[in-house]
């Protein structure tokens, strides 16, 4: 079903009032025009919404955690240099103990050296930290996907809200025009003595109520327009009609639940958080293992801090170090117990996410089915209200109905058309909500003609980078 308030035939004898809620545009020359279709609005929101861009930046920052973890496999190299003036005053005992020799003076002292340290084994902590960082990257990607789905759903809802409120505003404007025409006819008939002052007052009251509803519709449209600019990032123009996306959703509720259990980002994020918590336990346990490192150093000294006669010294060393933790106050054991409790919490979070997704899919599926029935019911209501209004007006011409009967029939028709517009809006929004609940609301599924952001590109750019402070985009 496509959302459109096609031609609505309204109200006054001999008067046809056309309400067009959506107009088809064939060309888009500006950014604003691109937002005038639902697909174009979704594309703009996907590319420009600051919330999505913020999550993308967070994902890129999380990517660097893998490089930090991998640095544990690499050597650490430190260079040092120092220079200064050294004063020595030495009193030495001569051989044989018959006398003493005294030497005093100043000497320039300088030292240059390089130290290299390589970890060979530390209880598999480096491997665990790497897997932990990778799990965090995967979890952040799913959080990014969740943010994209949220923004796309908000964009679709905002677009449909504005389209609905534009139709309702036009409907109320036309209603006021009809009520004004009815009031003029009632005044003419009152002047001719065909109706009473009560009929005139009833027409005036209905017009006042119609104008009040018009002001409320104008306020609603302004609110929806500001929300549209906030989410989409462009001023709206003539919005085109939109269609539901049921074709992208599973055909049955059971299939929707199965897809949601596998694809909903809330569940997949929780699964990666469990993996990260498992690695955190392994890191804590690795602290209880021995560690082995290889250290090398090379130093060149000019002068000596202990002898005025020493001019140069070259020294080098390669040393293997084994460190076995015996007892460090119990902090390691507390960290392991803490990590295990956190792991239990993450598993419970996963169960909670699964139940929440199941409830969300079931709720949105039921809402979608309800909107389908509402459209059929409200369309029949509009048809019946139109027939009833025509009949009441015809009967009123022959004195079988009062002015109040005509006004009530008019209001019934306006209410029915309002309900139909709202039901059509809800139908499309519900189809997008179901697609989001099962985890399939993405630009790839929707077929948006835009460049899709790929978080793996940045990941591979920085994962094995050994040096450099510039980001891949040259910042």
Image (cartoon, rainbow, N blue to C red):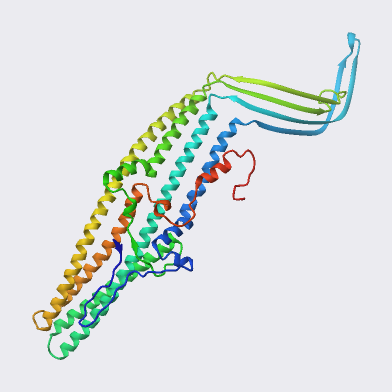
Q: Nearer the viewer, residue 273 or 2?
A: 2
> Which residue is rendered at x = 68% and y = 32% of the image?
77
Report whether residue 408 is seen: no
Report whether residue 182 is seen: yes
**Residue 22, x across and y down, in percent:** 34, 69
Looking at the image, is 239 positioned above or below residue 274? below
Looking at the image, is 345 positioned above or below residue 291? below
**Residue 345, x across and y down, in percent:** 38, 34
The image quarter containing residue 429 is: bottom left
Left or right side of 353 for 462: right
**Residue 355, x across and y down, in percent:** 30, 41
> Which residue is rendered at x = 18% and y = 70% of the image?
412
Q: Nearer the viewer, residue 446 or 13?
A: 446
**Residue 405, x across and y down, in percent:** 13, 76
The image quarter containing residue 23 is: bottom left
Residue extending furthest top?
Answer: 96
The image quarter containing residue 291 is: top right
Residue extending furthest left?
Answer: 400
Left or right side of 420 for 30: right
Q: Quadrant of the N terminus?
A: bottom left
Q: How many marks?
A: 0
Q: Nearer the viewer, residue 303 or 269?
A: 269
């Amino acid at each position: 079903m496509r959302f459109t308030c096609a031609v609505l035939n309204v109200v006054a004898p001999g008067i046809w009032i056309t309400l067009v809620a959506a107009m088809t545009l064939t060309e888009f020359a500006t950014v604003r025009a691109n937002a005038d279709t639902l697909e174009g609005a979704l594309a703009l929101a996907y590319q420009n919404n600051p919330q999505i861009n913020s999550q993308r930046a967070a994902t890129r920052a999380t990517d660097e955690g893998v490089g930090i973890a991998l640095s544990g496999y690499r050597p650490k190299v430190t260079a040092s240099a120092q220079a200064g003036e050294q004063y020595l005053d030495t009193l030495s005992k001569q051989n044989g103990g018959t006398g003493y020799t005294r030497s005093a003076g100043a000497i320039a002292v300088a030292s240059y050296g390089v130290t290299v340290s390589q970890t060979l084994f530390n209880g598999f902590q480096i491997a665990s930290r790497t897997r932990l960082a990778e799990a965090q990257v995967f979890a952040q990607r799913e959080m990014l996907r969740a943010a994209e789905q949220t923004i796309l759903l908000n964009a679709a809802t905002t677009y449909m809200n504005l389209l609905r409120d534009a139709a309702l505003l036009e409907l109320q404007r036309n209603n006021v025009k009809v009520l004004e025409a009815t009031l003029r006819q009632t005044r003419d008939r009152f002047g001719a003595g065909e109706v009473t002052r009560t009929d005139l007052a009833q027409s005036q009251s209905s017009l006042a109520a119609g104008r009040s509803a018009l002001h409320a519709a104008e306020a609603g449209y302004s609110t929806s327009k500001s929300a549209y600019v906030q989410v989409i990032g462009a001023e709206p123009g003539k919005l085109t009609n939109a269609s539901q996306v049921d074709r992208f959703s599973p055909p049955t509720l059971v299939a929707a639940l199965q897809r949601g259990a596998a694809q909903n980002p809330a569940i997949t994020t929780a699964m990666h958080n469990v993996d990260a918590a498992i690695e955190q336990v392994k890191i804590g346990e690795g602290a209880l293992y021995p560690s082995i490192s290889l250290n090398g150093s090379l130093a060149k000294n000019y002068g000596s801090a202990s002898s005025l006669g020493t001019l140069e010294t070259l020294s080098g060393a390669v040393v293997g170090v084994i460190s076995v933790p015996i007892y460090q106050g119990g902090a390691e054991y507390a960290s392991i117990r803490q990590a295990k409790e956190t792991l239990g919490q993450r598993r419970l979070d996963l169960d909670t996410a699964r139940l929440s997704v199941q409830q969300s899919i079931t709720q949105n599926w039921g809402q979608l089915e309800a909107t389908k029935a509402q459209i059929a019911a409200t369309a029949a209501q509009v048809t019946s209200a139109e027939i009833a209004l025509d009949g009441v007006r015809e009967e009123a011409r022959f004195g079988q109905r009062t002015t109040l009967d005509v006004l009530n029939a008019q209001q019934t028709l306006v209410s029915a058309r309002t309900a139909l517009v709202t039901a059509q809006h809800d139908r499309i929004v519900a189809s997008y909500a179901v697609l989001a609940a099962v985890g399939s609301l993405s630009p790839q599924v929707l077929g948006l003609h835009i460049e899709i952001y790929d978080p793996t590109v940045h990941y591979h750019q920085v994962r094995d980078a050994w040096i450099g402070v510039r980001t891949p985009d040259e910042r």
